[in-house]
Amino acid sequence: MLEAFQSDIRNVTVIKKTTVGVYVEGEYTPGAETTETAQMVVIPITPTQLKNLPEGAYQAGDMRFYHKGRSVYAAGDVFEVGGVCYKVRDVTDRSFEGNFSIYLAKRIYENA
């Protein structure tokens, strides 16, 4: 399926949480992270799709990421493309039907 979008494939930096943060004697210690690069099709979430998603969950500026194969990333991972970061919120594994996975990600704003 993704072969049809070959010209739209981009390099995406993926920041994966390998461990969760913990509190040690009242001080928060963030979890460890790993960084890797993946090739994905990156498409904005359209206004029509916004109507079908839970109210307020997404907005203009949020993205859909399509990755070939089974889902290897999880909610909470961060995708960076073009200097903009997006936090994965929903994962759909379509590997059985079309050998791809869909990640819906919310844009991270510095002020938020």
Image (cartoon, helix red, strand yellow):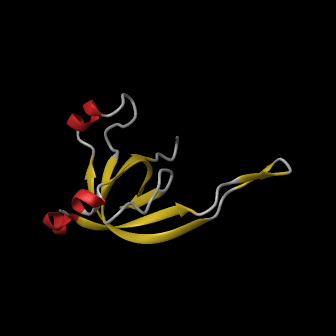
Q: Residue furthest right?
A: 25
| Percent coordinates x, y for residue 101 in the rendering | 32, 58
| Percent coordinates x, y for residue 15 in the rendering | 50, 63
Considering depth in this image, is 86 or 72 the residue closer to the camera? 72
Indicate whether 55 appears above or below 20. Answer: above
Q: Residue furthest front?
A: 96
Q: Residue at x 35, y 63 (%)?
A: 70
| Percent coordinates x, y for residue 13 in the rendering | 42, 66
Q: Residue at x 46, y 71 (%)?
A: 36
| Percent coordinates x, y for residue 43 in the rendering | 25, 53
Residue 95 in view: yes
Q: Residue at x 13, y 64 (%)?
A: 4
- Where the N terminus falls, by quadrant? bottom left
Considering depth in this image, is 84 or 14 the residue closer to the camera? 14
* Numbered circles on residues, count: 0
Residue 83 in view: no
Considering depth in this image, is 97 or 66 the residue closer to the camera? 97
Q: Residue at x 47, y 50 (%)?
A: 75
Q: Residue furthest top?
A: 55
